[in-house]
Image (spheres, helix red, strand yellow):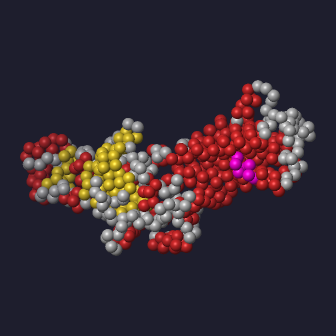
Amino acid sequence: MSATAAISIAGLSHLYGNLKALDQVAFDVGPGEIFGLLGPNGGGKTTLFRILATLLPVQEGQVQLLEFDLATEPSRIRHVIGVTFQFPSLDRKLTVRENLVTQGRLYGLSGGAFRERIDALLARLGLADRARDRVESLSGGLARRVEIAKGLLHDPRVLLLDEPSTGLDPGARLDLWRYLHLLREEAGVTVLVTTHLMEEAERCDRLGILDTGRLVALGSPAELRDSIGGDCLTIQSPAPEELARLITARFQVAPRLIGTQLRIETADGRELLGRLVETFGTAISSVALGKPTLEDVFVQRTGHKFWDETSSSV
Amino acid sequence: MASAAPLHTPHSALHTPFWLPVWSLAARELVRFFRQRTRLVGALGQPVLFWVLFGAGLHGSFSPPAWAPRSMTYQEYFFPGVAVMIVLFTAIFSTISIIEDRREGFLQGVLVAPISRLAIVLGKLCGGTALAVIQAGLFLALAPFLGLTMSPWTVIEVAMFLTLLAFALTALGFLIAWPLDSTQGFHAIMSIFLLPMWLLSGAFFPAGDAGWLKWVIQANPLTYGVAGLRRLLYSGETLDAAPGLPAMSVCVAVTTMFCAICIVISVWLANRRTSRDAR
């Protein structure tokens, strides 16, 4: 465990009954870093998020947030984290401002400086003219912004966001990420977000990829993509298994069968593409050449598609 | 921005003052109540309707218990019972919102705040109690129409006892609602447990001289809430020596004990970090 990490996780496992939601997860998040937890729904992101937010107990393993131990000092940690939930934690019957005042008082905030802080946050998040409106009258995007303001009220050192883009249109999503980067630059806030969106993961400094409770990859988006190699070929075929055998025999590459598609990672995809089409033209119904994406990283590390429709795992 | 800035510089006071969060949660309870007028109708309207209808309907078949003056009508007998019903209903309506808060997500934000779980419990209890005392107080203001006169001191005593009772019943509602994840579940418990508890408290009919019913009524903590309120409403005269009605000191002691037990269980429940809180 690094002494300077903002979040340090070692050997963390979590069980719901017999179901293993997290299995020996370990990673560090540096101070001022924007760290993304990427994974399909049910991969364990939300469980990990809830453990960090002090809502679930630490069953096995160690978690350190700033200088505090999560298992024994949850109340100290609650002072320094800001939490933004996937499902809004706002009282819909109260106005925007009332929601913020109610929450701030839970953190011991009151008085003139607190009111100014609310005004500043509302202005910054473009909510100043909606302060007197009840939350139930706001659009999903605006409510999400109030949710974020709520998480920032007490000036947390670590901000935890669970699927922050849920219900946001692309413009609002862009705004949100601009703001997260600003927070990191201006206030040095450490940010941990969970997401199942590749484009969102691309905006993080570093990523951890979670699949069925295990951390299958860790690194910056560029590092992860580079780990795969030069190019990525995706082949559709009426008889993929047989084609895979033929390709392996003929060229020194090992295609992987993902669903009904074949995937080949290779240094020079352009050249291989030409030879493949030349050799097995009729056995190939379509082929795509691309640079590896985070999705390819996921596929390569787990051996299955990110959105596995046939998967029955939870 | 200096990169060497200390990691740990929280702006929120490291030791949150205890009562500010309690006040915050209680105030929210009041604001919500006054924005949902239908709740007023539910908690105050139904008991008053019961009082008028049962009072008229059972007027002829009621004979006052041994400890009561011969002249006592059923409407008069039922009067403190209805006040307790208002307190019970208000407690139910305020604590049922715990389930909604959990489902709608508000509770998550409270649970990640750096406050003691006792403050969360007390916030709910103070809000619910204030609403219950206001509503029961409005109803009890009808007392002069029954010929009951109350001195200012009696009014204060009644208010204090109602507060204690409302605290106890809201705490009872809290410990029922906290582990539940559907309001239907609460309604079921209300029908098979809370309403019978009220029916068998001497609020609706007096305990007979013998039989199992008498024992059930004696074992019911709410009996002492109803009896205590009844005694206070007649203080200084008629009921001073009323065999069969628990003494005032017993009423206060039992209700206080009941309240303390419910609060302890509520705090214990709220203190657990379980998967339930994570939906």
Closer to us: B25 or A290: B25
Q: Position of residue A308 (x, y in %)?
A: 31, 46
Residue at figure coordinates x 22%, y 50% from the top left: A300
**In the image: residue B59, left or right of residue A139:** right
Residue lying at the far top in this picture: please name it.
B211
Does the magenta-highlighted stretch encompass residue B130?
Answer: no
Residue lying at the far front in this picture: please name it.
B249
Q: Is residue B264 visible?
A: yes
Relative to A288, is B197 above or below?
A: above
Does the magenta-highlighted stretch encompass residue B162?
Answer: yes
Q: Position of residue B221 (x, y in %)?
A: 70, 38
When asked about the image quadrant of residue B62, the answer is: top right
Question: How many marks are shown on the rendered structure?
Answer: 0
Residue at figure coordinates x 56%, y 51% from the top left: B118
When asked about the image quadrant of residue B220, the answer is: top right
What secondary structure is the magenta-colored segment mainly?
A: helix
Q: Is residue A197 visible?
A: no
Residue at figure coordinates x 78%, y 37% from the top left: B246
Relative to A218, is B274 above or below?
A: above
The magenta segment is B159-165
Q: Position of residue B151 (x, y in %)?
A: 85, 54
Q: Quadrant of the N terminus of chain A?
A: bottom left
Relative to B203, is B27 above or below?
A: below
**In the image: residue B93, left or right of residue A16:** right
When asked about the image quadrant of residue B239, the answer is: top right
Q: Quadrant of the C terminus of chain A?
A: top left
Q: Position of residue A297 (x, y in %)?
A: 24, 53
